[in-house]
Image (tube, grey):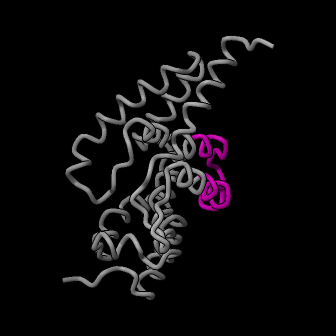
Amino acid sequence: MKLSAHTKALVDFLKEIEQLQRVKRIIDREDGSQENTAEHSWHVAMFVLMLGNEVDPKADMARMLKLALIHDLVEIYAGDTYMFDEKARENKEERELEAAKRLFSQLPKDKATEYWQLFEEFESLKTVEAKIVKSFDYIQPLMQNIIHNGATWQKRRLTAKMNDDKKRPTMIHNRKVLEIYEALHQEALGRKLFIDED
């Protein structure tokens, strides 16, 4: 049976984004393995599903789930950029923009337009939904490090201040988000998972 051109393009896109499972993130597990971006995106989507309307009952759940699942697809071509690698972050925006063009051009026009808009919404952080998803995007690695006894922080020599300076500004838009972040940050501090300040 022959698929319509529209459906075939969607199926082909699903084949293409399978590659997200091959993109390794700088999140180390105790067993030495690394998280991949598809795992990260799934976990962020679960944060949204479990906590999104907890932090803002008026936030659009469907839109937040789309943002969670789509915003990192560009890493298929651009790769993951570690938050604390300042050199790699210098051209992150350009690399991800080019990746988005390449990736979304493979979609039918209606989906390409929608995914472009979602990608830009997440990057600009102008909506409540984008701010919530971005916060969870930053909280998820914090939780990962707690689960894996600070493996990444120890290996990458990350202090509590370095982590907090980068992440806290993304949490202050919402009291509940900040509470979740603070609870996890305090747990990490209490368990001495960060490296000591020099």
Apparent side of residue 8 relative to residue 192 in the rendered image (left or right): right
The x, y position of residue 104, in whole percent, is 49, 25
63 versus 99 height, above or below: below
The x, y position of residue 176, in whole percent, is 55, 66
Camera-side residue: 170 or 194? Answer: 194
Residue pushed farthest right?
Answer: 1
Camera-side residue: 78 or 22? Answer: 22
Residue pushed farthest front?
Answer: 32
Residue lying at 51% horizontally and 70% vertically, measured from the top left: 143
The x, y position of residue 7, in whole percent, is 70, 18
Rendered image quadrant of residue 11: top right
- Give the residues in magenta: 45-66
Residue lying at 48% horizontally and 82% vertically, measured from the top left: 187
**Magenta span contains residue 152:** no
Q: Is residue 142 visible?
A: no
Which secondary structure type mostly characterizes the magenta part of the structure? helix
Residue lying at 45% horizontally and 38% vertically, measured from the top left: 76
Camera-side residue: 194 or 17? Answer: 17
The x, y position of residue 120, in whole percent, is 43, 34
